[in-house]
Amino acid sequence: MLIKLMTDLSQYVRSVADQARQASIDLAAATGEQKLAWLGRCADMLVSRADEILAENQKDLVAAEQAGLSDAMVDRLRLTPERLQNLASAVLEIGQLPDPVGEVIDSSKRPNGLLVTRVRVPLGVVFFIYESRPNVTMDAAALCVKSGNAVILRGGKEAIHSNTILHRVIADALRAEGLPEHAVQLVETTDRAAVGEFLGQGDLIDVTIPRGGKSLIERVAREATMPVIKHYDGICHVYVDASADPQMATRIAINSKCQRPGVCNAAETLLIHREAAAKFWPELAAELQAAGVELRCCEKSVEGIDGAIAATEEDFGTEYLDLILSVRIVDSLDEAAAHIRRFGSGHTESIVTADLAAAGWFQTHVDSSAVIVNASTRFNDGGEFGLGAEIGISTDRFHARGPCGLREIMTYKYVVHGAGQVR
């Protein structure tokens, strides 16, 4: 029986991947008008079918509470009329972005008369694995279809009812606009073995994008037979330079840590120059504690701070995803950069400074997917960067880095025009 189940699962996975490959061929040739009409229809249906969507979402919420999921996890699952309206607006925003398919990146004319152009084209088939938030289902589908990619969606079992109804909306809209219905497919089984099966379809799937916990991403990177766009950790830093304005530093530190502590671009470590620390560290610490932050401090920064905990080296390499912040006082900009190189994950780093030279040095010597000057780490986000949405944030160094929007899930090909030239 087990062998039969595995055989059936393998056949199912192969069928889904093959259908996605065929759909990607047709989708790559779809017009911008078709894709725009599909996005508009999806946005309309998110609102007109809100009662149906919310009823299915309620099933997931009940199951989540019965399973003892945390309040934060339940909130990530929850859809409301307002959230659906916001999701519809985000879909329309993606529709208003320029269609990247066929965009000429650059061109040149060779001495022999050949016209050589680089043209943006879809990657092909995307396998997207994600957890919890059902709104990601719509974001990923919108980005992939707009960029001409077929996508296989594998959401978490805690959101299966929500994802299923959202996929039904997506599929109904695809059929209505004459686009291939298998351009967006939802993995219908919650069996974890299915993930391994999909990761073995390297001949049909062009890229896998995991979005979730570190253990999931490590598994995907280990088992995938195709390229993976990923980030493991979001160990993000705010560095307060010697010249930093105290009020600005406080606003940025609190927003970076507290606005949404459970996301990958929330700050996990505060580095503060000793000169800035001498001026206002106790006041900054008090503001952080008043916001509910537990401080885990180095031997210099713990002095005189009531309630602070002595930090260990392990603390500086931990992604807390909670209202916990590790703190270190440093003697120089160079020491701050050295700390980031040692403990950071290449995700997001921010410097607060009034010194343009220091800002320039930090931008050059700190190499993460986003380096931010005088603003919160929370801005490393596809929507905030004007990408419409993102399918994930990459800390890889090849192809895509940082928030992955339309262009980041595409590649290019050379198109060459001649007039009979031979070599």
Image (cartoon, rainbow, N blue to C red):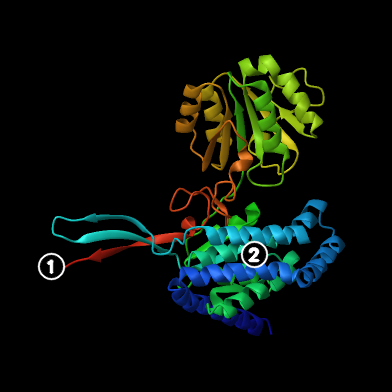
- Look at 53% across and 65% down and name the residue there: 144
Q: Where is mark 1, residue-wise?
A: 422
Crowd rating for badge 2 (residues with CA inside 10 Å; few <14, some 14–19, many 20+): many
Of 362 and 416, nearer the camera is 416
Question: Is 213 left or right of 231, judged from the image as shown?
Answer: right
- Give, as a three-letter code, the residue at label 1: Val
The image shows residue 21 at horizontal and vertical percentages of 48, 75
Question: Looking at the image, is mark 1 or mark 2 earlier in the sequence?
Answer: 2
Residue 235, image x and y in percent? 62, 40
Q: Position of residue 375 (x, y in %)?
A: 60, 34
Quarter-of-image position of residue 343: top right
Query: Does residue 246 lie above or below 97 as drawn?
Result: above
The outermost residue toward the right is: 66
What residue is drawn where x is 53% and y is 77%? 179
Query: Tag 2: residue type?
Result: Thr
Any mark on residue 137, and which?
A: 2
Decide: few, some or many residues near mark 1? Use Cα within 10 Å; few <14, some 14-19, many ≥20. Answer: few
- The structure residue drawn at horizontal position 74% and vertical position 72%, both measured from the top left corner, is 49
User: Where is residue 262 drawn, in percent x and y?
Assistant: 71, 46
Determine whether the residue tagged by mark 2 lies in a helix, strand or loop. helix
The answer to whether 35 appears left or right of 120 in the picture is right
Q: Quarter of the image holding residue 317?
A: top right
Residue 16 lies, with reference to residue 422, above or below; the image says below
Q: CA distance from mark 1 to mark 2?
A: 49 Å
Is residue 277 among the parts visible in the rendering? yes
* Whether label 1 touches label 2, CB < 8 Å: no
Q: In which quadrant will I find the N terminus?
A: bottom right
